[in-house]
Image (tube, rainbow, N blue to C red):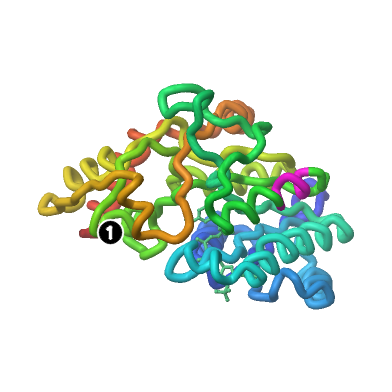
Amino acid sequence: MAANGSKANRFLIWGGEGWVAGHLKTLLEKQGKEVFSTTIRMQNREEVLAELDRVKPTHVLNAAGCTGRPNVDWCEDHKEETMRSNVIGTMNLTDCCFLKGIHCTVFATGCIYQYDDKHPWDGPGYLETDPANFKDSFYSDTKGHVEEIMKHYTNCLILRLRMPVSDDLNPRNFVTKISKYERVVDIPNSNTILTDLLPASILLAEHNDTGIYNFTNPGAISHNEVLSLFKEIVRPSFTWKNFTLEEQAKVIKAGRSNCKLDTTKLVNKLKEYNYEVPEIHAAYRACFERMKAAGVQ
Ligand SMILES: NC(=O)c1ccc[n+]([C@@H]2O[C@H](COP(=O)([O-])OP(=O)(O)OC[C@H]3O[C@@H](n4cnc5c(N)ncnc54)[C@H](OP(=O)(O)O)[C@@H]3O)[C@@H](O)[C@H]2O)c1
């Protein structure tokens, strides 16, 4: 029980061994919150229900998902496994939480859009209400479809991350990925700096907010802008080479989403909680300064 007599929050993180899950656990522990994690497969209904009964969380944070290894190209050749996790599993976990009266935050993706004539990179970003229009990757396709249905669950908060960035050079970090590619495209995109956004996810969950939120820093930043800042602040010796989207298409199996998301809904909601998310260029600068201060090279 909390001091005010209400039930104290108890978080259960799904996909416990994953990258985002690890960051969530560390953050909640730092905040002194009660937190548990699990690796139970989301699609195994009996096991999921038993786990919810055992841990008795007030909030589930679902950071589980089939993301493919070494990358989403894997999902093109493993469609059943991808659907079992990203469609059947994600829906099942949300439904089990609904039946047990548990709030469920889903760490979803904004990679369900691509720039089009009405949404050029320097035009309006995609809204939470815009239908998904990026179908060139099976991973993204599963995520777009499940969100369309799952948004009707009244216990469900859907947070659309894009190209997440941590303050280290973990292989899952978007910066690590593009710094290791032989060549990179140069297109503005919405990005999620985890240090800025993960505390916001806890705030939204604790307030039992529901619905869909574009979950990125405001604005868009191009690959070259990211790598220029990386070179300036973290690794002065760094160099890179660009190539075009057409050239990129020859070395990948699934297409890659490029888009800007509108963050007005998120920014306004977080204002209610006195929380501000920095614009993406300022956020990257701060992120790289934290890396440098920690001795990351
Ligand atoms: N990283 C990104 O670039 C990015 C961008 C936008 C959105 N997201 C989303 O954010 C979430 C977390 O991403 P992440 O980068 O932390 O991925 P990650 O490191 O691959 O972690 C995902 C975890 O989910 C587990 N998992 C997969 N299928 C499962 C299932 N059916 N039941 C239970 N656990 C399952 C995986 O376990 P196994 O390895 O044992 O399968 C893995 O430990 C994912 O849903 C992802 O789609 C990620």
Q: Position of residue 64 (x, y in %)?
A: 62, 64
Name the quarter where the C terminus is drawn.
bottom left
Task: Answer left or right for 11 relative to 177.
Answer: right
Q: Position of residue 281 (x, y in %)?
A: 34, 34
Q: Position of residue 57 (x, y in %)?
A: 76, 63
Task: Answer left or right for 220 relative to 203.
Answer: left
Q: Is residue 288 magenta?
A: no
Residue at horizontal 57 percent and vertical 58 percent from the top? 139
Residue 189 appearing in the image:
yes
Residue at horizontal 83 percent and vertical 71 percent from the top? 49
**Is 16 rendered above or below residue 249?**
below
Residue type of the residue flagged with mark 1: Tyr
- Within 10 Å of the Cα at label 1, are there few (<14), some (14-19), or many (20+) other Cα atoms? few
**Is 295 rendered above or below residue 18?**
above
Task: Answer left or right for 171 relative to 5.
Answer: left
Q: Which residues are magenta?
A: 146-151
- Mark count: 1
Residue at horizontal 56 percent and vertical 31 percent from the top? 126
> Assess mark 1: CB under 8 A from ligand 1?
no
Q: Position of residue 296 (x, y in %)?
A: 24, 59
Task: Answer left or right for 37 relative to 54.
Answer: left
Q: Quadrant of ligand 1?
A: bottom right
**Is 197 rendered above or below residue 274?**
below
